[in-house]
Image (tube, helix red, strand yellow):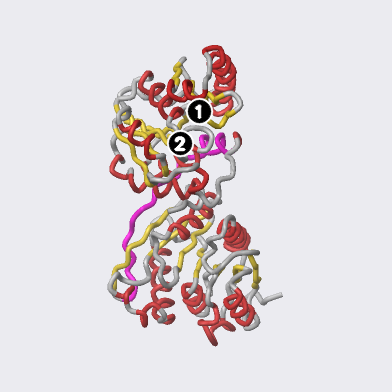
Amino acid sequence: MPFLDRRDAGRRLARQLERLRGCDVVVLGLPRGGVPVAFEVARALGAPLDVVVVRKLGVPMQPELAMGAVGEGGVTVVDQRVVALAGVGPDDVAHAEERERAELARRARRFRGDRPRVPLDGRTVVIVDDGIATGSTARAAGAVVRAQGAGRVVLAAPVCAPESARALAREFDEVVCLEVPRRFAAVGRFYDDFRPTDDEEVVELLGAPPVPPDEEVTVPAGGVDLPGTLTVPPGATGLVVFVHGSGSSRSSPRNRYVAGVLQAAGLGTLLFDLLTAAEEGDRAAVFDIDLLAARLGEATAWLRAAPGCGELPVGWFGASTGAAAALTAAADDDAVRGVVSRGGRPDLAGPRLGDVRAPTLLVVGGADRDVLELNRQAQARLRCVNRLAVVPGAGHLFEEPGTLQAAAALARDWFLEHLVRAAPGQVAE
């Protein structure tokens, strides 16, 4: 199961660690790539976030192959098996250690600045990386935090090589990995987007204000209670309600990825299931646009009455049939400030399209030719401020590398532009 990116992997990993909430937890990310994953884990657990700075000792002429690692506090771990197989001598190990310790000190200063390390004495420490190959870096990190007084040490990663998982299980109190594939080639193979994480992103995440964890809520709509997930960052400037399409739900990793992008931009999100578990198997209900639109309207009314949400402008993000529901509901709700459709079927909103007043963005994949044509026809019927944005190379589900990221960025920018400033009654340019 590939991950969209490190943030998506962190959210999935956090669900496996939920049981640790309230256990006096500290989350430590392994810089650089482990920090975006750890950020999501710390947010979900309501735990402080810090880094544990270690450096891999690369084999000469094969720097990607780890023969050990060094960490803060003078900790050194050497994998004698790799050293022997690579024919590395003691001087090579010593030179690599000297070089990496200088870089380790620089990074510790860069990442923390003047902030002291988060105290670990007697606490449960969760060490997080974006993936584990040989395990040398994780091993060094474990030694570092134990030397700093950690009471219990948990190692967590989205993916791990099987031989490393077995070995590390003997060295940590617990190892949590979402994927332990029999055939493991490289960590990056398990991510759609595995672009390098730079120092600036690490510093930004470590210095970010605490974001409240997701709140599981019950949304009354259409005479039934629907489960939802509400997240409102501090100082939120607006709220976006997700209207998923057929075959999707509030737990969809793609919906959660887009929600994370919006949250990082200061927007609150509500992801909720439009149908009950029994209704999801009824194809007639899945394509009942009027039913979905009515429930969206009731869910939005509930959200506007929720504590801390009433003054925030609201937008809707719809996918597939959810986009048709959002546009149908928007024809009756002049207060909604913006609508975004991703790979949607706005044509299913039929004659209601001309009554929509909320600024509307239609995002379609360039390779999704049939849906693209349906969106062009629907756009011609809109009378509100609108735009059709085509993501090159994207199919209907935006599964191609980088395409969902592009769609999420378009949605973020649209909502930031229109949630605060847009007013009902604007006419398309």
Say if 417 sits above or below 360 in the image: above
Using the rendered view, name the quadrant where residue 32 is placed: top right
- Identify which residue is drawn at 46% across, 28% down: 137
- Say which mark, if any, is on residue 66: 1
Q: Nearer the viewer, residue 379 or 165?
A: 165
At which x and y percent is residue 229?
38, 58
Of label 1 and label 2, which has the lower sequence position? Answer: 1
- Say which mark, if any, is on residue 133: 2
| Type of amino acid at the residue the image marks with label 1 | Ala
- Identify which residue is drawn at 29% across, 30% down: 173
Q: Nearer the viewer, residue 234 or 407?
A: 407
Q: Nearer the viewer, residue 174 or 68?
A: 68
Say if 323 sits above or below 145 in the image: below
| Type of amino acid at the residue the image marks with label 2 | Ala
Give the class, few, some or many, for how many residues have Cα within 10 Å of label 2's Cα (few <14, many ≥20).
many
Q: Helix, strand, or loop for circle 2?
A: loop
Using the rendered view, name the quadrant where residue 355 is placed: bottom right
Give the class, few, some or many, for how many residues have Cα within 10 Å of label 1's Cα (few <14, many ≥20).
many
Image side of residue 247 versus residue 172, left or right = right
At which x and y percent is residue 127?
40, 33
**Contact check, label 1 and label 2, Cβ < 8 Å:** yes
Say if 62 sits above or below 276 in the image: above
At which x and y percent is residue 406?
61, 58
- One can see residue 409 in this view: yes
- One can see residue 71 in this view: no
Q: Helix, strand, or loop for circle 1?
A: strand
Task: Give the position of the C terminus as an image quadrant.
Answer: bottom right
- Identify which residue is drawn at 44% across, 43% down: 184
Cα–Cα span, label 1 and label 2 = 9 Å
Using the rendered view, name the quadrant where residue 119 is placed: top left
Q: Which residues are magenta?
A: 201-222
- Identify which residue is drawn at 46% across, 34% down: 29
